[in-house]
Image (spheres, rainbow, N blue to C red):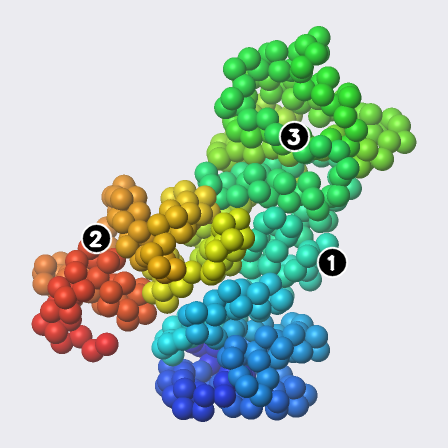
Amino acid sequence: MLKNLSNLPILFVDDDELWLENTLRGLKILGLKKVEGCSNPLEVLDRLQSTKYNLIVIDLWMPQKPGEILLNEIKQHYPDIPIIIITADNHVDTAVKCMQNGAANFLTKPIEPNQVITYIKQIITDTTHTKINSSSTSDTLSSPIQYFSTLSQTVKMQNIFNFIDTNYLSILPILITGESGCGKSNLAFSIYKAYRRLGEFVTFDFADINNQNSFFDLSNPKSINQLISTNNEITIYFKNIDLLTINSQYCLLNLFQTIQNEHHNSLSNVLELPKFILSSTIDIIKEDTLISDLNFILKIQHIIIPPLRERIIDIPLLFMSFINRYIIKNNINMPHIPKELLPLLEQYYFPNNIQELEDMFKYALDNCNRGKLSMESFKEHMDLHRDIDSFTKCNNVFSSCKILPTLKESQHLLILEALKRSNGNQAHAAHLLGITRQGLNRKIQSFNIKI
């Protein structure tokens, strides 16, 4: 598993020499041959002059020089080196600020070497993929992980941001598809902000439009055509365009063609003409549900937003954004975040994506007990929304086995997988298996599993 990582130079900076020694020893046992440690943050910049590191892991709280300051210094001189911040669980908000200043991710202590390996592998893989498959981040990005109102630190989302910036002067409409709750509306508004258009941002949802013929009727004073003719630089966002009737598709196509002709036959600046952004929870290009000419126009600037389960690395950033907005709105102190919460969330499927994550935190924050988020509210939600159908759709894991394992052997394998996914956290593993922690502990002892 670590074949591609074993010979990459990685530097750990932490003034806790005992933790540093134990962590480095564990990482070397797991296969990282060139991992190095530095207990004095004042020496880091000098070491960077002589050694090129593929990744740096920095402790946030060091008396000689705080990790937040060291991060800024490294990014100033070596912006391409990915950096992971390590912090205590009660300083997560500061760690998220570090991510906004260029850190790739953060980890909370205590953390085991195998957990560190998982994050290192993900960061190195994403960084390598970025160098091979994408250009450098556009100057229009406000930070490496924030694109106006849209937050992310994944390569897929960064490539989307770059694509949007590249097509800044295009007259063509932008189509956004993705699962429900994945952030299509938020990205549409980010596009409006990125293009710095002076006109209004107006949203129409075809799920709420009962009479589409009237909506596109030129003689109707409240039609989309009349709105466009009286508003310069307007941005129109159409939601649920998969609900368009055939007749409405022809009307929309005619609208696009009219604006394109106006641009080609005059000296009108692109930014002075209407901009159209459309979205659908169905990949209408792939499903081929549109008339051919409209399909052709929309697939040119087609953005597919990945679901949250493919953006697990974004979860810390997103939930801290929700919490920060909540505490500012309600003028309260930052709540205590259990260190087990992030590993728990990373194992959830999130069928309703970012919207579901936000709803979970709103409920937990509204029911916060003595300034501490309750793990139980998250567990109850996950249990209530378990996607049972997904199990039946998966290929049977035993279908390729010539000899079936016994029920006891299957239990053993299932427990090992739960412990692996929870990074050895027995409370989390017990929740994944739907049993009590005491019940799991008895099973671990009976199978003589070494933790």
Which quadrant of the figure contains the C terminus? Answer: bottom left
Of callouts 1 and 3, which one flags the residue occurring earlier in the amino acid sequence? Answer: 1
Image coordinates for residue 416, horizontal then vertical, percent = 23, 67
Q: Amino acid at mark 1?
A: Asp
Q: Secondary structure at mark 3?
A: strand
Residue at 71%, 32% in the rendered image: 200
Read off the residue under disc 3.
Answer: 202
Residue at 32%, 52% in the rendered image: 378
Tell me if residue 332 comes above or below residue 13 in the rendering. above
Of callouts 1 and 2, which one flags the residue occurring earlier in the amino acid sequence? Answer: 1
Image coordinates for residue 424, horizontal then vertical, percent = 28, 71
Q: Amino acid at mark 3?
A: Val
Q: Amino acid at mark 2?
A: Ser
Residue 139 marker: 1
Image coordinates for residue 395, horizontal then vertical, percent = 27, 49
Residue at 19%, 55% in the rendered image: 434
> Which one is in front, 450 or 203?
203
Q: Which mark is nearer the camera, 1 or 3?
A: 3
Q: Are marks 2 and 3 in contact (CB under 8 Å)?
A: no
